[in-house]
């Protein structure tokens, strides 16, 4: 956490109001996001109790499981969830545009550009909190390997037809959420805490109601008092006025309301199964329907406040202009969505339970690069974020006081002008360190030379000045220009090339099962002999 963030938290604590941590919105928001507010049974993370889901603020779809321990009812819940979520996802698959991508030529191995399809937009799933993101991943893991009756007629508990496909998509959303800067699956608490600072800890900010209380606190009411009321205030029946953002439920709700309602449902279902004739069954069927409606009302009473809170959070975020680089990161999400769409259409198997060594290393390298890229882009897009980097000595801003044209040595001299920048910042500069500035959206590099007599920073420009002997107009700063230079790179380089999965060395688990060709020298271990045993 930067010094600017700490100062914002201290100011929020002093004034009782949330303070901005950003001047722009650093995440892309879809025009038609799908909001998903799940609820789970206490003590059973994989047993859904219900959910509110939809793209319309005023008309969410309510899904419930009257008896979460019943496998058939859970499958029915997942089937209804698939009926809502999969059409939403598939509505983005058909609208495509032409795009170029660099791929290896299968014959020569050289990198060439090929024209491929790219989805013009992608779906976006928004959940209340970070726990909701983990629940999405858990649901995906529990569903993607299920077998349907069509796939396996002998399966003891076949899943509804579209449930495995739903699991694959939820797994993709969950995996993509681990990539820094991705916006396919977002937690509203993380979005709000990224753009506003409060007087709470990061753990306390996972309560959506308390976080919004800081941001929306009315005049004359402290944010801390409003957040405390959101967390603890109860009605005359002992129920929370602002239920937690889920998917967990409040113990008082479980013990006083939910457990008796489920027990009444179980009794009604048991009595219906033991009915002696049709007349008696009709009366018991009405009792069962009433018990189901009671559970529906209870689930909606716990999820509707959180549903409204998510949309209020979207309203607050939409007051900020979108950061310039956010749309570039969204393009990466579109590539990810398009790739998974193509894998599903090609009939590839579901994502494995455990990644092989090469895939895991690629994922880790990608996330590290994307984190560095996100940090750099947020600083370039937002003066408030850049101020934190300047205070940390990772950037400096100042006025150009002198420009001396110089040239490189050699047969074809190139412009290497020396620029002096007067700054009040204290960057961590050593001889030969490279610094960067944004020139028409591209990073221009310079090398630190020395400090002048007045403490100004002397830099030598290195690139982005054209190939001619004279520098291109606008590529060299002029006296009086005020510039911001960073010690971090604006674009991240690719990592080292990793071997193919079938060439995984034995130090990392060896190649996957069945990937080694018979007789390949040096790939298989020596056979075990009697001398190997004590």
Image (cartoon, rainbow, N blue to C red):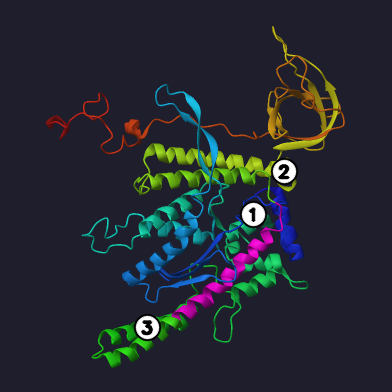
> Which residue lies under the disc numbered 2?
386
* Badge 2 or badge 1: first in the primary sequence: 1
Q: Quadrant of the C terminus?
A: top left
Residue found 47% across the figure and 41% down from its top: 364
For the residue labelled by badge 1, is the local secondary structure a helix, a strand or a loop? helix
Where residue 441 appears, as percent x and y from the top left, is 70, 35
- Please tell me whether residue 277 is drawn above or below residue 524 in the rendered image: below
Q: Quote the CA–CA distance across marks 2 and 1.
A: 15 Å
- Mark 2 surroundings: few (<14), some (14-19) or many (≥20) residues within 10 A: many
Where residue 253 appears, as percent x and y from the top left, is 49, 79
* Badge 2 or badge 3: first in the primary sequence: 3
Give the magenta-colored segment's residue range. 295-321
Q: Which mark is residue 194?
A: 1
> Which residue lies under the disc numbered 3?
265
- Is 106 on the left or on the right of 18, as rendered? left
- Please tell me whether residue 404 is drawn above or below residue 242 in the rendered image: above
From the image, state whether disc 2 or disc 3 is nearer to you. 3
For the residue labelled by badge 3, is the local secondary structure a helix, a strand or a loop? helix
Quick one: 512 or 78, which is closer to the camera?
78
For the residue labelled by badge 2, is the local secondary structure a helix, a strand or a loop? helix
Secondary structure that dominates the magenta span: helix
Residue found 64% across the figure and 59% down from its top: 192
From the image, state whether disc 1 or disc 3 is nearer to you. 3
- Is 271 on the left or on the right of 499, as rendered? left
Where residue 472 appears, as percent x and y from the top left, is 77, 22
Q: Quote the CA–CA distance across marks 1 and 3.
A: 43 Å
């Amino acid at each position: 956490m930067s010094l600017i963030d700490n100062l914002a938290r201290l100011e929020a604590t002093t004034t009782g109001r949330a303070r901005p941590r950003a001047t722009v919105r650093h995440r892309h928001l879809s025009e038609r996001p799908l909001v998903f507010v799940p609820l789970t049974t206490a003590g059973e993370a994989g047993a859904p109790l219900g959910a509110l889901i939809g793209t319309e603020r005023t008309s969410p779809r309510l899904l419930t499981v009257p008896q979460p321990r019943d496998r058939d009812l859970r499958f029915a819940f997942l089937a209804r969830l698939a009926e809502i979520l999969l059409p939403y996802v598939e509505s983005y698959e058909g609208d495509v545009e032409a795009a170029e991508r660099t791929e290896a030529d299968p014959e020569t191995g050289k990198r060439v550009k090929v024209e491929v399809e790219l989805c013009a937009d992608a779906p976006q799933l928004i959940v209340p909190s970070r726990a909701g993101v983990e629940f999405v991943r858990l649901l995906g893991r529990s569903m993607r390997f299920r077998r349907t009756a069509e796939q396996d007629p002998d399966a003891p508990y076949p899943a509804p037809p579209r449930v495995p496909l739903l699991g694959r998509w939820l797994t993709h959303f969950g995996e993509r959420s681990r990539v820094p800067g991705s916006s396919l699956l977002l937690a509203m608490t993380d979005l709000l805490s990224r753009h506003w600072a409060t007087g709470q800890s990061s753990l306390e900010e996972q309560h959506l109601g308390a976080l919004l209380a800081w941001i929306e606190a009315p005049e004359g009411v402290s944010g801390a008092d409003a957040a405390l009321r959101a967390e603890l205030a109860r009605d005359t029946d002992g129920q929370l006025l602002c239920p937690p953002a889920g998917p967990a439920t409040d113990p008082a709700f479980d013990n006083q309301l939910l457990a008796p309602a489920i027990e009444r449902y179980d009794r009604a279902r048991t009595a219906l199964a033991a009915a002696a004739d049709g007349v008696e069954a009709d009366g018991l069927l009405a009792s069962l329907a009433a018990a189901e409606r009671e559970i529906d009302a209870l689930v909606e009473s716990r999820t509707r406040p959180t549903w409204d809170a998510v949309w209020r959070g979207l309203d607050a975020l939409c007051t900020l202009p979108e950061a310039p680089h956010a749309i570039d990161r969204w393009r990466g999400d579109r590539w990810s969505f398009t790739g998974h769409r193509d894998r599903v259409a090609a009939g590839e198997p579901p994502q494995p339970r455990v990644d092989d060594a090469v895939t895991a290393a690629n994922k880790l390298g990608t996330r590290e690069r994307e984190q560095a890229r996100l940090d750099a882009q947020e600083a370039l897009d937002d003066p408030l974020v850049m101020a934190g980097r300047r205070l940390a000595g990772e950037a400096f801003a100042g006025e150009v006081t002198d420009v001396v044209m110089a040239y490189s040595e050699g047969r074809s001299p190139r412009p290497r002008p020396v620029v002096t920048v007067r700054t009040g910042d204290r960057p961590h500069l050593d001889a030969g360190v490279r610094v960067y500035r944004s020139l028409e959206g591209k990073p221009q590099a310079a090398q630190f030379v020395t400090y002048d007599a007045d403490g100004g920073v002397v830099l030598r420009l290195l690139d982005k000045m054209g190939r001619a002997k004279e520098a291109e107009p606008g590529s060299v700063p002029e006296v009086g220009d005020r510039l911001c230079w960073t010690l971090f790179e604006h674009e991240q380089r690719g990592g080292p090339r990793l071997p193919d999965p079938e060439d995984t060395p034995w130090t990392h688990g060896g190649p996957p099962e069945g990937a080694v060709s018979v007789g390949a020298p040096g790939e298989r271990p020596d056979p075990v002999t009697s001398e190997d045993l004590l």
